[in-house]
Amino acid sequence: MAILEIDNVNKSFGGLRALWEVNLKVDEGAVHAIIGPNGAGKSTLLNCLVGRLAPDTGKVTFEGREVLGHKPYEINQMGIARVFQTPEIFEDLTLLDNVMIPAMAKKDGAFKLNAWRRVSARKDVREEAEHILEDVGLADQRHLVCSSLSRGDKRRLEMAMCLIQHPKLLLLDEPTAGMSRADTNATIDLLKKIGERGITKIIIEHDMHVVFSLASRISVLARGTFIAEGTPDEIKGDPKVQEAYLGGAQA
């Protein structure tokens, strides 16, 4: 059963056509990867899904509800959360504070200082935040200021900030970009662990090791439109994909 359906979405910037007749269905509980060369329109598509951009035409439904036209915080309240390519965290606050803020922010619709002050006094939210930090392997650093974290740990922290919002759909934009192989493998393990929660995931990723380790379904975006979709094995053997993205050789 599809949890997300994208129908004929188009987006242009002046004379540049970023997305053209994009159609996609993502099944509930799936790990659906979107791959493609730089400039293919992948991040533009995610920005349309979370309300940062408005498509020119098309329709997006999440659990049968129309997404387009809603503000980003309203889409978040529907159950869609996003991990950005560059981690968006509060550098001057502790890890624990960073995870607690979204718990109230989801209710209020924005990251507000007064919301943080209210939530910081709630024992139940603090305990949940500590538990989630333990799940992502950051419990020992929970009282550290975030500016001291490595890139891999900042990525894990941002995932924790998403998890406390109890999303139904998690969008991950290049979750291992700039990571060492050790941090990449740790992130793969973390995403597999998150999968045990039943959260549907859309992953944009250039690292084919990550894609083939996680994805149950892969869609290939090139020049703003999908040119192929299938299982990892099907995508590996698709000549159009090899030409457009995999360099003419199987991964």
Image (cartoon, helix red, strand yellow):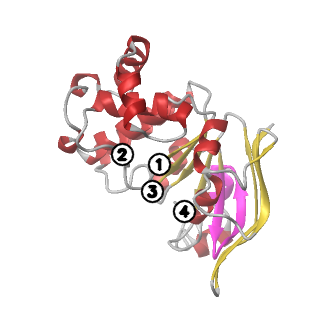
Nearest the viewer among 90 and 42 is 90
Q: Is residue 71 left or right of residue 145?
A: right
> Toward which corner of the image does residue 42 lie, by quadrant?
bottom right
Q: Which residue is mark 3?
A: 207
What kind of residue is marked 4? Ser
Query: Counting residues from the N terminus, which is met first, the one under dot 2 or under dot 1?
Result: 2
In the rendered view, tell whether residue 89 sits above or below residue 38: above
Question: CB atoms at circles 2 and 1 under 8 Å apart?
Answer: yes
Of labels 4 and 1, earlier in sequence is: 4
Q: Earlier in the sequence, mark 2 or mark 3?
A: 2
Tell me which amino acid carries mark 1: Val
Can I make out residue 24 in this image?
A: yes
Q: Residue at x 62, y 61 (%)?
A: 45
Q: Are marks 2 and 4 in contact (CB under 8 Å)?
A: no
Residue 6: tell me if it is visible: no
Contact flag, marks 3 and 4 (Cβ < 8 Å): no
Is 122 in front, or is 7?
122
Determine whether, in the image, residue 1 is placed left or right of residue 190. Answer: right
Indicate which disc residue 184 carries: 2
Q: Give the farthest residue toward the front.
A: 114
Q: Which residue is mark 4?
A: 43
Give the mark nearer the N terminus: 3 vs 4: 4
